[in-house]
Amino acid sequence: MEKIVILTGAGISAESGLGTFRDEGGLWAQHRIEDVATPEGFARDPALVHRFYNARRVQAAKAKSNAAHAALARLQMDFPGEVVIVTQNVDSLHESGGAEHVIHMHGTLAGAFCPACSHRWASPPEMAVGEPCPACGAATARPDVVWFGEMPYHMDAIYDHLAEATLFAAIGTSGQVYPAAAFVHEALQSGARTVELNLEPSTGTSSFDEVILGPATETVPSWVDDLLSPR
Ligand code: OAD
């Protein structure tokens, strides 16, 4: 059976109005990674980190999924094989676009996490310093997102999927953050064909068998049309 494994990044949500990280004017031009996306930054100034993620939660709640998210949902529904979507994005736009079984390797804005007892719950729209964990009462609740220096979620399942992939696609990701940036090599080792869909060539573009450049809302629907058209 054919198995398509798709890795998405911030570029797939760019046309929904959510900023990417490394493009000109992206989030990392406005904030220091060390301050807002590391466990050390949270320990130093949790209020700043909560403000950063509260703002992103407000922005994400207003964003609507776009034609690229919808096309991947259609592929998942109609492809006569398995389609696994792995996203680095913390928004829920794949789900609002109709996708099922999305693997959020960097967590989600919709979740809160207690580092003291590992309890997870639905995040309120605004998180605040000192908010008690509903399970153990510890006042160290944080967004359920993966920060630099932390292990992304669901890695065993992702590597199992990559080992079985017949086609691997990376969509809207700059290929600068590991381990996601190395998925293409895992897929190649499994004998999968590899394709990149991005606005511009990513850092790892030479590892892909095929590169399709352009905005995701245009390239992804037509790539999906090709995959679904009878051969
Ligand atoms: P980046 O901001 O690094 O890369 C986004 C990519 O999307 C770039 O290569 C852009 O060229 C491309 N892009 C922009 N607009 C696009 C469009 N309309 N259509 C198609 N492509 C477009 O974002 P990620 O690769 O997702 O991690 O970043 C990976 C991780 O680094 C994130 O999950 C986050 C970040 O720091 C953490 O916070 C832990």
Image: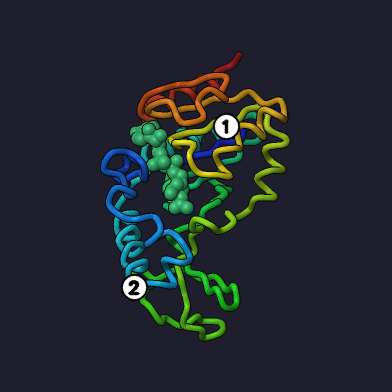
Q: Residue at x 39, y 71 (%)?
A: 124
**Residue reaching furthest bottom?**
137
Quarter of image, res 37: bottom left
Quadrant where the N terminus is found in the figure: top right
Residue 155: percent from left, percent from top: 65, 50
Quarter of image, res 128: bottom left
Circle 1 sits on which residue? 78
Question: In the rendered image of this protein, does residue 167 appear above or below residue 142?
Answer: above
- Nearest the viewer among 85 and 95 is 85
Question: In the rendered image of this protein, does residue 48 appear above or below residue 174?
Answer: below
Residue 135: percent from left, percent from top: 56, 82
Q: Residue at x 45, y 37 (%)?
A: 173
Question: In the rendered image of this protein, does residue 95 appear above or below residue 58?
Answer: above
Circle 2 sits on which residue? 47
Determine the CA span between mark 1 and mark 2. 45 Å
Residue 107: percent from left, percent from top: 51, 57
Mark 2 element type? helix
Badge 2 amino acid = Ala
Badge 1 amino acid = Asp
